[in-house]
Amino acid sequence: MFQFRARAPQDQAAGPADDECSFIDPGTGTREEIRYLDVGDDGGQVYMVHHHARGKPRGGVILCGSINADREGCLRTLVDIARDLAANDFDVVRFDYRGIGESTGDFSGYCLSDWQADIEACVKLLREKLPGLPIGLWGIRAGALLASEVFKTTGDGALLCAPMDGQPLLQAILRRSLVNDMLGRPDSKRSSRDEIIAALERGEFVNVDGYAWSKRLWRDAGTHRFVAPANDARPWLVVDFTDFPRTNLDAEHEPRRKVSTVGRFWEATPTRVAKDSSLRDITLAWLVSMSDFCGSVGPTLL
């Protein structure tokens, strides 16, 4: 059941309203609120969905998705996870980075550092909504890399699914795009991955999955490296997948590794992850540990 708030004509040019659209998910009975969040000074806005806890909130979670075709492959799973966590009394925010999906802005003008700021803005918003309660960062692929960097300064827990360094991540996305293009258009002429990277280095824009990659995106990605949190008592996990290369972790961090049997769902046609999946169970167990930890030490503030 959708509930739209009418807006006065003079408000139409002011951008999306804070509570322009909300509805009740019939499967969980939880309220979902759609809004746009102003981030930065470029006029870009982050599209976000706030899934409200069914009962008294136990904490909050920011779901940090990925980019390019990974974003589409992850979308259904993120929706399911958000609704599942809300049904278990956690407030959840899922969103699109500026220039991607439902958010405003031109993709070609953004890079990983900008999208890190988007995550920080979502954390700040949820902190204001849930004062005194723990906030966790849940990330997949590019979102896992960026969440790990945001976790250095804020957040009470982090769950990082298949994190990679920035440029290897872009190379993997590019490789998959080239393979799909070859399968879909076998007779067409195409550039190699090395030729595309050389074009980026020359300052050319390159179309990858319908997104205009830039030299700034490529160069900035080289400054983002996944580093596991060191000497950090806060609950954090790295989640690997049975059909995907394992994340490099030091021996001391090996207990922080969990393995999901779901498989690399971000590379498939958008599909629904089963409600009894290991990824769901890992996520809920992590959130319980975060709530217990913060019950004794209090939330980490930005």
Image: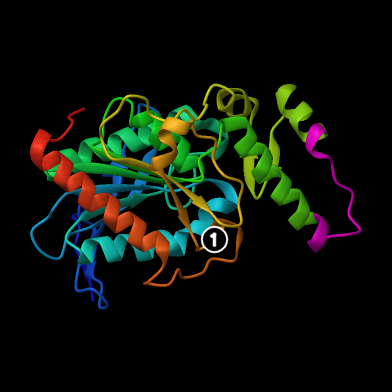
* Residue 268, horizontal then vertical, whole percent: 60, 63
Q: Amino acid at mark 1?
A: Phe
The quarter of the picture where the C terminus appears is: top left
Specify whether 9 is left or right of 140.
left
State yes or no: residue 17 in magenta: no
Which residue position holds label 1? Answer: 265
Q: Residue at x 19, y 62 (%)?
A: 6
Disc 1 element = helix
Q: Residue at x 53, y 45 (%)?
A: 67
Q: Residue at x 51, y 69 (%)?
A: 271
Q: Residues within 10 Å of mark 1 (few under 14, many from 20)?
A: some
Q: Residue at x 61, y 46 (%)?
A: 245
Foreground residue among 237 and 275: 237
State yes or no: residue 193 in magenta: yes
The quarter of the picture where the N terminus appears is: bottom left
Residue 24: which quarter of the image? Answer: bottom left
What is the magenta range? 182-194
Would you place residue 184 above or below residue 296 in this image? below
* Residue 176, horizontal then vertical, whole percent: 70, 50
* Residue 36, horizontal then vertical, whole percent: 30, 47
Foreground residue among 11 and 114: 114
Characterize the magenta stretch by its predominant secondary structure: loop
